[in-house]
Amino acid sequence: MTKSYLPNSDDKGIRLVCLVANLGSALVELRLRLPLGRWAAQNGGCVRIISIYEFTPADLGWGDIFVFQRDSNQYVLALIKFLRSHGKKIVFEIDDLLTELPPFLSHHVALIANKFYLVESLQQADVVTVTTPRLGKELSVYNQNIRCVPNCSESLPNECAHHHAVPSHEVSLIVASSDKVLVDFLVPALTLAQEKLSVNIVAIGPIGNYFSKKGLNVIKTRIMPYAVFKSYVASIDNGIGLIPLDESLFSSCKSPIKYFDYTVAGIPSICSNVPPYSDHIVNGRNGILVENTTDSLYSAIESLVLSHSMRSRITESAIAYVHNNYGWDTAVNAWNTVISTLDPHIPLIRGETQYLYFKHRMGIKININKLYWVAKSIISPASYLIVYKIFKSYGIRGLINRIRRS
């Protein structure tokens, strides 16, 4: 799948084109497809979500507003400048403080190498959308027009975990991570929990292998699509979500979406007592806040494991908080504000403008669509990922050089 259309039936409303690196990612689902699909339905708008490497010239002519998500490089920056030169409005959507990566995320080599392009893309955008006010404050040094579109979540129909008076060995601790995080302090507390309470540990993502190497008995599950993840968590009765976080500036700018998702799935959360979780949780009421120490974490785990009524009470309070403040209408209204403030000029007659070429920053004329298919024709299917990585890390020029050598 290279395109996802969320059109209004008459196709005459404001037109958004979201150019993304990975159409199947949870971030695209959470930040774009779900909220903008509802925005389009409620406001007569039209949305196309397209791979940034597989759009057509007609897509560029069709759109009024172009949304770029999170990452940038030489190729992305050149495309942003090209679209702006033709009167298009640019939204740069970002959910992390990628300009200030902490040491434990140093494996994001491409992000670090492309910081220059990320900063200039932020500066070039008509508006930058962020997940939290704290993230917006940090990025305001690059662009003053910052708009917060919070991450939101809602329960899946007829899917919610339940809590019963069961022995501790029927309670599950859930830890999910799609990336490398600092979780060393979790291991001693989890070891105690298994030794004293015989709890289950459900690990979603690469963190499961780490726990196994530390001697924990873990039910390991791979990263899954966003809707599948929410459904899976909601199927774990007597579950407790553990959400560790360090005290870095980068982490403090993150969104509490994992807390929201656990909540609407019927799972109470134990979170590190740092932002963003301390911004939303009243300790003991709609969640548990802990210090990143073995004693603090184990004490919270023991309390929830041994009391199903406490699990139920905290979950009910958390569900009310999330539904009242961070349901999908909140995200839809925030997107509507962003789009309204851009006030794009919509031509009376929209032709399918054929933008066949744009100038590479080194002065080379490139036909983007043809370039993709040239690369595809000379490289084996098993190597498509290499093409994507070259694009992402080195831009068009790097791919051209590779093609020429081939």
Image: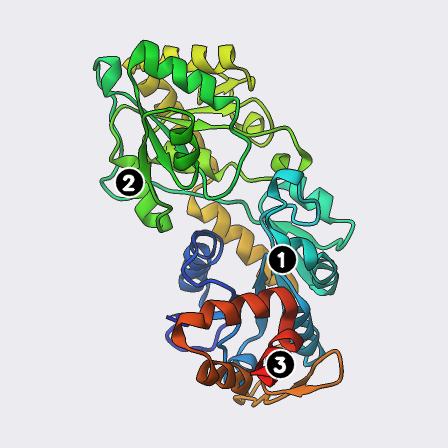
How many numbered marks are there?
A: 3
Q: Which mark is residue 232?
A: 2
Read off the residue under disc 1. Answer: 110
- Secondary structure beneath dot 2 equals helix
Q: Is residue 191 left or right of residue 197?
A: right
Residue 282 at what x, y percent from top left?
Answer: 51, 20
Which callout, 1 or 3, points at the residue further toward the start of the chain?
1
- Say which amino acid is labelled 1: Ala
Mark 2 in CB contact with mark 1 (< 8 angstroms): no
Q: Is residue 7 left or right of residue 179?
A: left
Which of the image's four quarters has the C terminus? bottom right
Read off the residue under disc 3. Answer: 400
Which of the image's four quarters has the N terminus? bottom left
Residue 205 at what x, y percent from top left?
Answer: 40, 41
Near mark 2 (Cα within 10 A), the count class, few <14, some 14-19 or many ≥20, is some
In front of the other: 55 or 112: 112
Residue at the image position 35 percent from the left and 48 percent from the top:
224
